[in-house]
Image: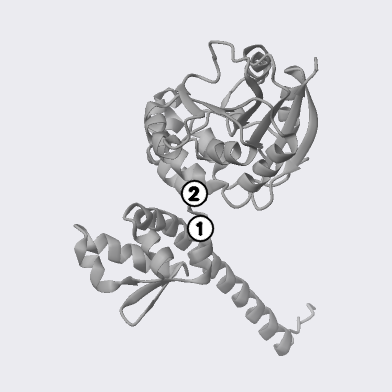
Amino acid sequence: MKKKIKIKKNNFKTEVAKSFKQENELEKASMKFLSYGIACQAICLIEHASILKILLNKGKFRENQIKNFKNPSLIKTAFISLIGAKIISYKDNNYFLTKFGKYIAKKIGFITIPFVGYRKLISKQSELLDNPESFKFSDIDFPAIALSSIDFGVDNLDPLLIKIFKVIKPRGTICDLGCGTGEKLVKICQVTNSPGLGIEQSKGVIKESQKFIKNYPEIEIVKGSITALKGVWEDVTVALISFVCHDIKSKNKCSKILYSYQKHFPRMKCLIVVDIVSLSKKVPTIMPGFDYVHGLQGLTPRTYEETIETFEKARYDVLQEISVPNMSNTFIWILKPNDL
């Protein structure tokens, strides 16, 4: 004869309540996940419309200002999406940034790099899955990435770099390889009282850079490929290369390029490398969006361990390594050529 299984009422109620609570939490998390995904697009839109700047500078945006846009419905629904993500609040016919919203707005570069700079690539991800050869460099908005990069490291990376250059006290020209708009180079040259040379491949970015360097005749930005430099600059004593190495697919090629700088800058005392690394045992975290936008290009970014190996093959010693605060997986390496 089978024994009857007795279920205590209190235990049953507890288990049901626990299960319901877990499901409810998962439901909330899934809605938050969706809300933040849409909010990333919405905040890029209001940034493009210069509304984000108004919210930061004036503290509010009046609802009746929406009618001034050609597509007021789009602006209105962007605001609604941002309210859902707790980025924007609404009161007395005005929109405001929440505390969280202000923090996000000040770090907008982290969002606009993937969602604006790589928007064309993201839109064709299914095509790239089936046909990786469909990738084109014209799918990347390099000027947008360069402008976003100004905000990307302004609070955390730039102050560290300025401190490093103050300690180094360069006696000669500072070269920024892949300088973008040149704003970072201007800051560094100002505090060290040094001449500067920026090398940038994109014509659009060089054009944008003129507004940053026009009052600094001792700083020059020239067009050139930093992966295939032509010429020798004997006045350069310190070189900086930021967020470039991970874009060079082959480790051997990356090492050869880094080594070549010792020939192009024969008086270079140190090379400062700033880069992001991928997930590994040594660094078990990620920089959001970093790996994915490079995967769209057919690249698998290097890990920390692989990056250090690249420096060794390029015949550099690591003098100092700094983990950049509040920027996941981002490091500054101060390298010295082996021969010095």
**Cβ atoms under marks 2 and 1 closer than 8 Å:** no
- Mark 1 is surrounded, within 10 Å at the Cα level, by few (under 14), some (14 to 19) or many (20 or more) other residues, namely some
> Which percent across, then down, holds residue 52?
39, 60
Rendered image: mark on residue 243: none
Q: Nearer the viewer, residue 258 or 87?
A: 258
Q: Which mark is residue 109?
A: 2
The Cα–Cα distance between marks 2 and 1, rounded to whole angstroms, is: 8 Å
The number of numbered discs placed on residues in the rendered structure image is: 2
What is the three-letter code of the residue carrying label 2? Gly
> Which part of the image, by quadrant, shows the N terminus?
bottom right
| Local SS, label 2 | helix
User: What colouring method underlies this structural image?
Assistant: one colour
Rendering coords of residue 212 (x, y %): 44, 39
Residue 333: image x %, image y %? 72, 34
Label 1: element kind: helix
- The x, y position of residue 287, in whole percent, is 61, 46
- Quarter-of-image position of residue 21: bottom right
Q: Residues within 10 Å of mark 2 (few under 14, many from 20)?
A: many
Residue 284 located left or right of residue 146: right
Q: Can the viewer see residue 140? A: no
Where 161 sits versus 228, above or below?
Answer: below
The quarter of the rendered structure image containing the C terminus is: top right
Residue type (three-letter) at the residue carrying disc 1: Lys
Instruction: Identify which residue is drawn at 43% across, 46% down.
Output: 115
Q: Residue at x 69, y 20 (%)?
A: 268
**Left or right, residue 139 beside residue 336:** left
Residue of label 1? 106
Viewer-closest of 3 and 273: 273
